[in-house]
Image (spheres, rainbow, N blue to C red):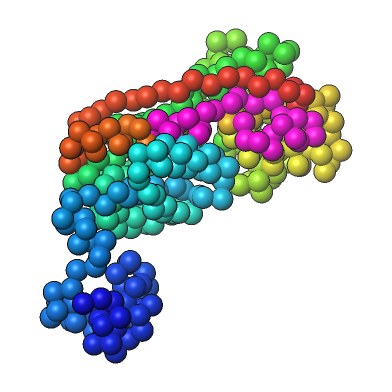
Amino acid sequence: MNIIKIADLAGVSKSTVSRYLNNGYVSEEAREKIKKVIEETGFVPKRQAQAMRLQKTNLIGVIVPKISTETAARVIEGITNELSEVGYEVLIGNTNLSIEKEMDYLKVFKNQVDGIIFMATEVTPKHYELFDQLSIPIVVIAQKVKHYPCIIHDDYHAAKDAIHYLINKGHQSIGFIGVGEYDEAVGIDRKKGYLDALKEHQIQIKEEYIQIGDFSHESAFCLTEKLMNLPHPPTAIFAVTDNLAIGCMEYLNENNYQIPKDVAVMGLGDIKISAYMSPPLTTIHYHFQTMGAKSAKLLTEMIKAGKLSSKNCESNFIFNYRLMERRSV
């Protein structure tokens, strides 16, 4: 029995059966026909049959928030490089910043792969509920989680050091472009680093200097406009990601501000384009590719050890960072 015979018996195309078996879109009518034939014939797809025999798929599910970003690409490169050396293939789930899609991928992957690497922007009680239902190990990247292994950067101290750097360069009025607190690492920890650095230098915190939006260039462009239209605009702007810093620079360049003469700009992350901006962006370098490789190594070690879950394998691996001095400050 194969999918061609299943398709003939169900009266549908081979591609429809393939989509059904791979959790793709199939009409309800076709789905019921295929399901009935499979139940009557006892058909087991080749990959599932192999998995049942070996109790292993040699697949790792990787869930990322937005595959088009350089950050995700670097993490995935680290993961795939590491996994290819030990014989694993990768299934990538691109959620496009949708929590609902994250949930869907966690549900789908739990029956198809040997382990999951989850690059998170937000971890809710519903996430933990799904984590607890997994009978395979999971490693979380970029967010701190309780009771599960995670790979993170030191977002608090990275942001704090960025502000110390700006202050040591003579800036006392520093604008902040951030994101919502639903993202603990970027929205909370980096903001706290900004605030604590100002406090340590006894610099007054001005609420109008703190502008919160989303992760897009457009958001940073609009927030920079707000900052520069204040009665006393800041002399420096810190953006919590390089992508936001670039949106900030786009506004400044389009409106004839000279960087850094009129206003300095600093980012965080060190994506490749940062070094080629005009002027090149001063930022904090994050080791995203190494982070991906570490997550893959940690996951495969748990699989090799025969762990059916990574719950209570709590271990936080915190990656360091380095300052990239360029000409935007």
- Residue at (53, 44) in percent of width and height: 73
Q: Nearer the viewer, residue 143 or 237?
A: 143
Query: Taking the image as drawn, is residue 122 in sight?
Result: no
- Residue at (71, 17) in percent of width and height: 171
Residue 115 location (% of width, % of height): 28, 44
Residue 89 location (% of width, % of height): 38, 49
The quarter of the picture where residue 36 lies is bottom left
Q: Is 68 positioned to the left or the right of 56 in the image? A: right
- Residue at (27, 32) in percent of width and height: 301
Residue 202 location (% of width, % of height): 59, 10
Q: Nearer the viewer, residue 300 or 261?
A: 300
Figure quadrant of the N terminus: bottom left
Q: Nearer the viewer, residue 202 or 94?
A: 94
Q: Is 275 positioned to the left or the right of 163 in the image? A: right
The residues colored magenta run: 270-295
Q: Is 98 positioned to the left or the right of 45 in the image? A: right
The quarter of the picture where residue 277 lies is top right
Figure quadrant of the C terminus: top right
The answer to whether residue 122 is magenta is: no
The answer to whether residue 279 is magenta is: yes
